[in-house]
Image (cartoon, helix red, strand yellow):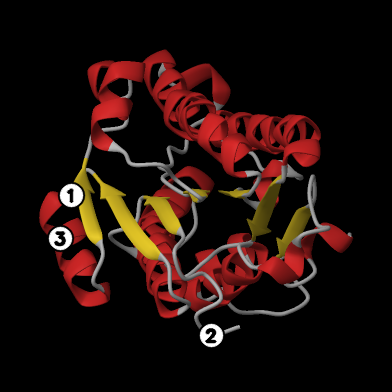
Amino acid sequence: MTNSLERKTALVTGGASGIGEAVAHTLSSRGAQVIVADRDGNAARRVAADIGGTAWEVDLLDPDQVSDEALARALPPIDILVNNAGVQRLSPIEDFAPGDFRMIVTLMLEVPFLLIRRVLPCMYEREWGRIINVSSVHGLRASPFKSAYVSAKHGLEGLSKVTALEGGPKGVTSNCISPGYVRTPLVEKQLAEQAEVHGIPESEVLSRIMLTESAIKRLVEPSEVASLVGWLASEESTMVTGASYTMDGGWSAR
């Protein structure tokens, strides 16, 4: 599959660290020209330099930066879109700040919609395109204290399926990858937050909270998610669309 993505341009949001960085490296290694989108411009430029790609310093929560006009100025035609950017907040519903709820849903559902909306016309014109949405097991299952994240990921799963139905006849596939807890800065930050909200020591969060439903008792590695992105972006996955690929160590098998 090496160099199977030559002459393809990929956009990876949240591409400066964690899953996004691993995805950027994987797609680049297969020949794609990768645009690394992240609000951390220095980190985005570092990853882009590593892979010979392009950095796009962008605040996806700023409406002026994701308007039709701004996206038209910032982006070339895109062949592969990887919606990966995300954040997390933990709180009981009655204490969940409405502003945080709106922010999470905007970043992880509305922004993917805006980007999909932007890239589809060119994909349709070329009769080829890949929409790959980094969802979560929380797009399929719920956990307490994550009302915004679970809502956004469930919505992303639905958006991905609608995109698959509309795009299929025009050569565009759309799929979700739904991992369990991945070894990323986002998950590492959750250790203290989970300990506080559940009232347990931080050292017990992995075993008692994060991995309790998994048959395989370890975190997912970013490279594992990236390998699946690479396959979904390839010609070998042409018949795969509207799917959600779990990578959760058996969590959703329960």
Does the rendering let one see residue 121? Answer: yes
Q: Which mark is residue 2?
A: 2
At which x and y percent is residue 203? 44, 71
* C-alpha span from label 3 to label 2: 24 Å
Rendered location of residue 31, percent (x, y): 43, 74
Give residue 43's position: percent from left, percent from top.
17, 60
Mark 3 crowdedness (10 Å alpha carbons): few <14, some 14-19, many ≥20: many
Tell me the residue at 43%/55% (across/down). 10
Q: Is residue 15 above or below residue 48?
A: above
Element assignment for label 1: loop
The Cα–Cα distance between marks 1 and 2, rounded to whole angstroms, is 30 Å
Q: Name the N-terminal-most of marks 1 and 2.
A: 2
Earlier in the chain: of badge 1 and badge 3, it is 1
Horizontal side of 253 relative to 100 (left or right) equals right
Tag 1 residue:
40
Q: Residue at x 73, y 72 (%)?
A: 249
**Residue at 57% in and 76% down:** 224
What amino acid type should be assigned to the residue bearing mark 1? Answer: Asp
Q: Which residue is mark 3?
A: 45
SS at circle 2: loop
Q: Is residue 42 left or right of residue 91?
A: left
Q: Nearer the viewer, mark 1 or mark 3?
A: 3
